[in-house]
Amino acid sequence: MEPDWEGPLGEAYARAMTYLEGLPERPVGAWATADELRAKLGGRLPEVPVDPVQTISQLADAVEGGLVATGSARFFGFVIGGATPASLAADWLATVWDQNAGLYAAAPAAAVVEEIAAGWLVELFGLPAQTSVGFVTGGQMANFTGLAAARYDVLRKAGWDVEADGLIGAPRVRVLVGAERHGTVDRALRFLGLGTRCIVPVAVDGQGRMRPDALERELGQGPTIVCAQAGNVNTGAIDPLDEICELAGDAWVHVDGAFGLWSAVGTPINGLAKADSWATDAHKWLNVPYDSGLVFCAHPAAHRAAMGVRASYLIHDEDQRDPLDYNPEFSRRARGIAVYAAIRALGRQGIVELVDRCCAMAQRFAARLNEYEVLNDVVLNQVLVRFGDDDLTKRVVKAVQQEGTAWMSGTTWQGRAAMRISVSNWTTAEADVDRSVEAIRRCVEIEQARSTQG
Ligand SMILES: *Cc1c(COP(=O)(O)O)cnc(C)c1O
């Protein structure tokens, strides 16, 4: 059969351009209801073929109202970030090339692209030179992989081979982690069979940073993992890593730096390189399309012991890096290609500027919203704003989401409702912040008026 690439890819290109060029003015939130989406997308199971061009154009029409413009300069929800043109284009090509990036033998270019990007990343973050890298789906799997290497290593030191013998009968592993950790840490520990009861919560300060004095009290004997954080999801605060690593001694220190790690490119984080493993996301602050997480391990042998795999039918070239030795996946897309292109196109300078600009925009938000209550020290790209009380704050968050100029989510910080503003898009400029602040003010006024009427 003669394939027609031109038709569907041409349609996809045209749709992509309409979408991307429309980002500055389209409502940031979705407007279709779930029922509307189901009505447009649903129907009986297709029994007969449909023309591919029509398939693509119908799909694009049907999802339109259900798309959240996460690539918009005024999307400030969840530290999501957009995509830079180079990373997006490279991601398209990665899909076109359709490489199985598990093995060097099956995908030499993909393996070498990742090897090169890995080296650049280690240098950008200032990690130890021998650090191994895995290109995983996101922060969740980066935490999982880093903690898997940790589990292997702390148990090995206790005389237990977890990879062979599993956890039944193994010495108990304690995981000391800040009370303000990200939920993916708990989930990774569940996946690893350690369970959430292995967690020893460590007290945090007013910004959510792990307190070294509290850590010191909890450190004990036996296999221990300390899980620190660079970039609290609410406040953006970074744990005192230098003190944590010093206190931890023989314990394995894993750093969840899903977005905060990127700040280390321009402003070194004291003690960062003393940790044993690190997790971050390329799909957040580096503005690479989903899915793209990164795990780093200062002990490649532990990384490989936890993840590596050999099978009779696989071809391993001992001189080459097989990506599957560093990933929980076996077959997978060559997601490192977009990371490579992002770094190449931005350069170190561009990454520093991108991060600094986002932080400056967060400062601008905090300054312009200071007639309300800013709950956190704005040290990075996160701003928590409260409007009077919990009820008004929640209503304002909802009203802003529906109004369409901007989109931010809500959170609860130390028992109080807040609007959570995360600036992580490479295109966000001062005018976007100002327009968003105006939208917030209008929503506050409307909601306040409704309160006094009600
Ligand atoms: C986003 C985030 C994660 C999870 O990352 P995913 O890419 O969503 O899997 C973990 N930790 C922190 C601190 C985060 O901000």
Image (cartoon, rainbow, N blue to C red):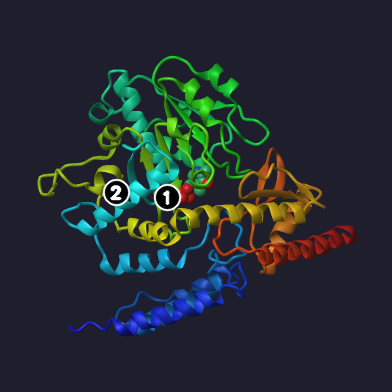
Q: Answer yes or no: disc 2 within 8 Å of ligand 1.
A: no
Circle 2: residue type: Glu
Residue behind mark 1? 138
Q: For the point 32% across and 23% down, which residue is it?
A: 155
Q: For the point 72% across and 64% down, which residue is it?
A: 434
Q: Secondary structure at mark 1?
A: loop
Q: Quadrant of the C terminus?
A: bottom right
* Residue 338: quarter of image: bottom left
Q: For the point 45% across and 74% down, which residue is it?
A: 41
Q: Secondary structure at mark 2?
A: loop
Residue behind mark 2? 329
Residue 200 makes an appearance in the image: no
Q: Answer yes or no: disc 1 within 8 Å of ligand 1.
A: yes
Q: Is residue 150 above or below residue 375?
A: above
Q: Earlier in the sequence, mark 1 or mark 2?
A: 1
Circle 1: residue type: Gly
Q: For the point 60% across and 33% down, which residue is it?
A: 209
Q: Quadrant of the N terminus?
A: bottom left
Task: Pick out the residue farthest to the top.
Answer: 221
Q: At which x and y percent is residue 410? A: 66, 52
215 left or right, relative to 173? right
Dot 1 alpha-carbon crowd within 10 angstroms: few under 14, some 14 to 19, many 20 or more: many
Task: Pick out the residue farthest to the left.
Answer: 312
Nearest the viewer among 169 and 333 is 333
Nearest the viewer among 382 and 117 is 117
Q: At which x and y percent is residue 422? A: 61, 53
Q: Is residue 287 above or below residue 404?
A: above
* Residue 449: quarter of image: bottom right
Residue 147 makes an appearance in the image: yes
